[in-house]
Amino acid sequence: MEIISFKFPHSDLKSISADTMAEVLSGVYSDRLHKVTIVDCRYPYEFEGGHIRGAVNMYTRDAVNSLLGTQTTAGKRHVLIFHCEFSSER
């Protein structure tokens, strides 16, 4: 899975390309990933206007922290992919 970096205000965050995202969604990495959760960090009205199939809408810090605090199955890879539009608030 290719991880790329872009030059933008949060360039310390790792990113994946649209092609890699399409591969994840189509199951190309299913032999290596037990579970993939796409977290849509946009506001609910944005999410309701259209979102990636299967994504969960978590737009508050508390919601994301709750997800990060959940237990995963030992030895299984659970990948979180965060999706949002650029915002000075997120």
Image (tube, rainbow, N blue to C red):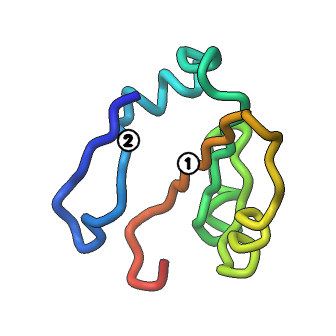
Place of residue 70 in the rendered image (x, y in percent of width and height, measured from the top left): 82, 60
Place of residue 76 in the rendered image (x, y in percent of width and height, measured from the top left): 73, 34
Q: In terms of secondary structure, where does tag 1 sit?
A: strand
Q: Quadrant of the N terminus?
A: top left
Place of residue 65 in the rendered image (x, y in percent of width and height, measured from the top left): 71, 74
Q: In terms of secondary structure, where does tag 2 sit?
A: loop
- Residue at the far bottom: name it: 89
Say left or right for 81 vs 58: left
Q: Would you name the residue on which mark 1 appears? A: 81
Disc 2 and disc 1 in contact, CB within 8 angstroms = yes
Say left or right for 75 vs 28: right
Q: Residue at x 36, y 49 (%)?
A: 15
Q: Residue at x 71, y 64 (%)?
A: 68
Q: Nearer the viewer, residue 17 or 1?
A: 1
**Up-down: is 28 above or below 83?**
above
Residue type pointed to by label 1:
Ile
